[in-house]
């Protein structure tokens, strides 16, 4: 028995809307037409897919089973159609990107700009989230590719990972910060002040704690305060208007450093850097759009000033 993908699409729409009229409009069908289609499928399978009453329409256990296995088929079908359009039109179709907050702010805009110039018909959608959320979206195929730091993931099995060039971690403060009056300044001295930072992986805290000779538990207590925010303007304004020391990668603070509103502190932590990666699912062949995306990232990062 072969179930037409159209039937699965109809079951999914009806389950989501819980109403024949709304589901039919979404599918471009008449309400009687959708009702007949669902009834035909029920006759073919010899099961009842929906419980119907005057107030609601809900999937039965058989309907739920179709939804469980049918939704991935629908996503694959949509992906197939998009990829074929891309191949046929030479840059049409759709690409869904999941990006971590920092790469989204630092270089993704330049990548998308370069792609738009070369492939203007490519439709791109971007979701910005933390890596763990992006990993779930990738597994559900709600995004085609993720651009993030995977060191935080508990399970990297089944992932095809391309690691990008990293940025070293730097430390900055406002130009009139009291720490600048010190004759010497060490990595440990930074924690005499509040720390303002984007969200960073736990592995970085472990490395920093080891470098300054304390336990990670002691470090992450942040006895002088922690301000964690991945919205960069807020982070920069915080550093400019307080005694907080900014911690992150240099591109976050580069304009303020260049305009001499911030000072780049002469402190480093060897072995601590960003680690952003292009991640796809191993079991799926890369689509043309993903290949274009991956190559464009490499081109932009290799040619950045």
Image: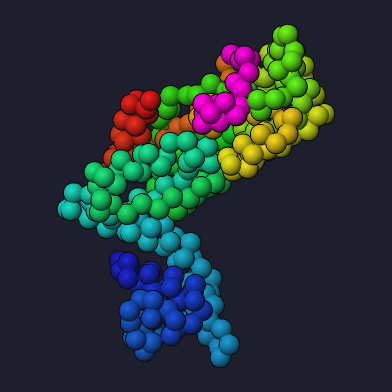
The magenta region covers: 254-270
> Foreground residue, 83 or 208?
208
Work out whether 159 lies above or below 50. Answer: above
Whether the magenta-drawn stretch holds residue 127 is answered as: no
Relative to 275, 224 lies left or right: right
Specify whether 156 is left or right of 171. Answer: left
- When the figure is inspected, residue 109 is found, relative to residue 254, above or below; the finding is below
Instruction: Identify which residue, 140 or 269, lies in the foreground.
Output: 269
Residue 241 visible here = yes
Residue 69 at x, y percent in the picture: 44, 60
Residue 272, horizontal then vertical, whole percent:
58, 20
- Which quadrant of the structure image shows residue 160? top left
Q: Quadrant of residue 281?
A: top left
Residue at horizontal 67 percent and vertical 33 percent from the top: 239
Magenta stretch holds residue 263: yes
Towards the viewer: 116 or 17: 116
């Amino acid at each position: 028995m072969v179930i037409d993908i159209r039937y699965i699409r109809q079951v999914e729409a009806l389950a989501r809307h819980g109403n024949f009229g709304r589901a039919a409009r979404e599918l471009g069908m008449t309400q009687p037409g959708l009702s007949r289609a669902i009834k035909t499928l029920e006759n073919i399978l010899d099961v009842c897919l929906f419980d119907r009453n005057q107030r609601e329409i809900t999937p039965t256990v058989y309907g739920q089973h179709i939804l469980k296995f049918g939704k991935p088929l629908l996503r694959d079908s949509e992906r197939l159609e998009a990829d074929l359009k891309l191949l046929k039109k030479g840059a049409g179709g759709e690409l869904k990107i999941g990006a971590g907050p920092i790469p989204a702010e630092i270089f993704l805009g330049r990548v998308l700009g370069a792609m738009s110039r070369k492939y203007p018909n490519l439709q791109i959608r971007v979701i910005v989230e933390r890596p763990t959320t992006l990993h779930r979206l990738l597994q559900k195929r709600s995004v085609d590719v993720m651009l993030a730091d995977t060191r935080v993931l508990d399970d990297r099995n089944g992932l095809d990972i391309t690691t990008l060039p990293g940025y070293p971690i730097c430390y900055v403060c406002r130009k009139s910060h009291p720490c600048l009056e010190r004759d010497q300044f060490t990595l440990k001295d930074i924690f005499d002040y509040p720390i303002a930072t984007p969200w960073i992986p736990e592995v970085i805290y472990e490395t920093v704690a080891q470098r300054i000779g304390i336990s990670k538990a002691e470090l992450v207590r942040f006895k002088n305060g922690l301000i964690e925010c991945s919205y960069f303007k807020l982070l920069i304004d915080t550093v400019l208007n307080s005694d907080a020391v900014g911690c992150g990668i240099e591109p976050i603070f580069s304009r303020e450093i260049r305009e001499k509103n911030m000072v780049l502190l002469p402190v480093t932590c060897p072995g601590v850097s960003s680690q952003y990666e292009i991640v796809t699912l191993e079991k799926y062949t890369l689509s043309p759009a993903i290949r274009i995306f991956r190559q464009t990232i490499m081109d932009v990062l290799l040619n950045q000033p």
